[in-house]
Image (cartoon, grey):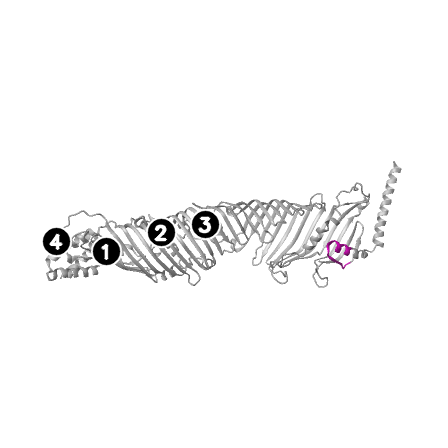
Amino acid sequence: MKRLLSTLLAAIGILAVLAVGAVIYVTTFLDPEDLKPQLENVVQEQTGLTLALEGPISWSLYPRLGVGVEKADAWLPEQSVDDDVPFMAFRRAEVSLAFTSLLRGEVAIDGMTLDGLRLNLSRDESGRGNWEALIERLAAGDEKLPAPVGASAAPVPGGDSGPSVAFNIASVEVKDGEVSYADHAVGHSLHLKGLSVSGRNVNPRQPFPFSASFQLLGHDTPAGAGDTVPQVASDVTLEGRLAMDLAERRYALEDLSLVTSNRLAGLKSPQQLELNGQRLVVDMTDQHLRLEPGTLKATLEHAALGEEPLSLVMEFALESDLAAGSAQLRDLTLSGDDGLRLRGNLNLAGLYDAPRYDGQLRLAPLSLRPWLERFDSLPTMADAEALSDVALTTPLEGDLERVNLTGMTLVLDDSTFTGQMAADLDGHGLEVDLQGDSLNLDAYLPASSPEASGAAGLGLPGIRGAYAQQDEGLLPVEWLRELALDGNLALSRLQLAGLDFRDVSLRLEGSDGRQRLTSLESSFYGGSLAATGELDLTGDPVAWRLSPRLERVHVDTLLEALGEDNEPAPLRGRAFVEGELTTRGNTWPAMKRGLNGRLDTRLSDGAILDVNVSRELCSAVATLQGEKIQREWAPETRFEHAEATFKVRDGVVESDDIAVTLPGIDIGGEGSLDLTSERFDLRAAARVVDTADAACEVNPHLERLPLPVRCEGRLAGDSAEWCRFDREGFQAAIGDALREEIGSRAGDEVEQRLEGALDKLEESVGEETGGQIRDALKGLFE
């Protein structure tokens, strides 16, 4: 036994002496410089690269046997060695073998180090990369290259009994590397600085720890760094466990962690991104990539995003066909601050030339208010809860220029819309085709203030709210000027300015600086409303045109809707309005000053409520004639028709043909309203006429005796003080009539008759005004 043990120890000693002797012989008598030409020829034969080994090749001894190469450059076949920057270069490369493994008959690579790597990549104007010819040459020569050696240390069956290669590298390091990439096709460049790559216990049969870090600089010119400020600067760290199937060209990175800190030009705060994945698989044979599951976390800081950083988390599974340039994002979930939760799936195609996408998205109900507050874009709205319940479900498709929501369902508070919408991502194109159940637009407009209530004009709540912001531009002119618009909107019900519109159909078109209201049709308080119009933004100020048309609209319900405190309407009837209005400007004051146009109005089947003008006039006339009227009177004044033409000139509305026809009574008037000063002046008078349907019989001399009324003041004033009897007008008219009828017989008899008429007037117009009329008439006959 001792002899056997002594023999084994002697054999091991002999082998050790032989191995040491072989190493001493190789390192002493074999000059590594003699290998340079052979290495350069092999590289050129296999890859086409022109290799220049400018530095020395050196050996290293115990405890590691290795070889090192100083300073090497390599040029592509189409490059000039004398003039062009090398395609690849490094300061030093070293490979070492474990000496103790050699004693066991194994070749185990102990370490590989590449220091100062420089790699220059570029794409020409046609999009072809300078590395592609190299890859194609290597792919074509795969059959000539030796097959990868397994990791087993055992002898290959049927082969030579020489030492095997144990592919288990203790350490792989790339230090201080740089990679430059210039894309002349798109005019951009990337630069990787401080590239560091390391791996431990590198073995193709099992995953091994892997890490990489570098700084990425992006420029908007293909020239690259120089003295230009990079548009993006990112510090990148990558960690994980890498598995390599070299024979199948299949690589997997487990427990992936990619962390980046990105600084964008013009921004002080860095943007943080972190990608984590359970398993990333890249199959170069099938050109396939798969990541599942993956989580992308982002912390974004920007003035436009508010004072606090915006945190977003996206979970997904990714599959990509690298050859086709396509990818699928499955089980996509985007969550963030303030209740954001978006789910869906996306298919990506054309990633290398013209990216496009399609898929399905579903936005869970959330409140938009905190998001708009974050962006300082929350408008002043009448409803404090508006935009607090928003949800969206839609298929989508598009590219880097346009997105199309092809079948959306949008929930906006109490409203639901369906249809489709397409928009250019630069904001210059918008197509909308939506159908909705109901929309209370007043809830999203500014609330009317007490100060603006009377000054807003015409008592419309929506106008009052806008009037409060009269110094601001009503519309985003610059955006609308460039917008190409194609819009259709259908609503079962629309509430605007306190008014109720039913079965609304709206058509909008716009291009070349002109936005057109092609058609607006709606059921409106028992009748119909239609309008066309145009907004011309080609000049400054902008020009407006509106052509409205109302037919058979119930005036009483419309006036009650416009009024306040549920006050009853003073009249009823069916209104017909048609005309055309134009103006200029983008603020309410400018638009009021520049308003011009014409409106033709007519009212049929109407009545003035709570007063009977026929009774008052007939009673007064009968009294003047010494008679009494024996008949029943309706509590209201019914009329056959009323009409007027309103002309608008530079913000002043005028009419000189206001006419109301009652049975046997004509009412006429004229007036004006200055929209800028909001002052108005209206004169009207009622006259009894002897016709077949006369309200009462009158003396021919008293026909057309007027009962004048004058209304004047400001819209912001007290409406109770607006109107009064026109004493001067009435005095002049009655004086002329009486002088014509009785001549010089004026005296006590006439005064007695006038007393009865004036008493009747007092009952209608009030004691004070009636007394004034009485005094005036008495003075007329004195």
Q: What stretch is highlighted in magenta?
A: 39-55
Q: Residue at x 27, y 56 (%)?
A: 721
* Other-residue count near label 2 (Cα within 10 Å), few / some / many at <14 / 14–19 / ≥20: many
Is residue 17 toward the left or the right of residue 204 in the image? Answer: right
Q: Which residue is the site of mark 2?
A: 529
**What is the crowding at mark 3: few (fewer than 14 residues within 10 Å), some, or many (at least 20)?**
some
Res. 433 mark? 3
Calculate the distance from the C-alpha at mark 2 to the C-alpha at mark 3.
Answer: 21 Å
Quick check: is 49 in the magenta stretch?
Answer: yes
Tag in front: 4 or 3: 3
Image quarter in which the N terminus is found: top right
Where residue 258 sits in the image (x, y, percent)?
Answer: 63, 49
Q: How far apart are marks 1 and 4 (CA)?
A: 25 Å
**Distance (Cα) linking label 4 and label 3:** 72 Å
Label whose residue precedes the other's in the sequence (2 or 3): 3
Q: Where in the figure is residue 44, as x and y percent of width and height?
A: 75, 56
Which labelled disc corresponds to residue 667?
1
| Relative depth, front residue between 422 and 199 | 422
Q: Which of marks 1 and 3 is nearer the N terminus?
A: 3
In this view, the mark in front (1 or 4): 1
Between 150 and 45, the one lying in front of the other is: 45
Q: Kindly state the secondary structure of the residue where label 3 is placed.
A: strand
> Horizontal placement of 72 versus 708: left or right?
right
Q: Classify mark 4: helix, strand or loop.
A: loop
* Circles 2 and 3: CB atoms closer than 8 Å: no
Q: In this view, does 135 lie to the left or right of 584?
A: right
Q: Is residue 202 above or below residue 743?
A: above
Residue 398 falls within the magenta-colored stretch: no
| Residue beneath disc 4 | 626
Q: What element carries label 1?
A: strand
Callout 4 amino acid: Gly
Dot 2 or dot 4, earlier in sequence: 2
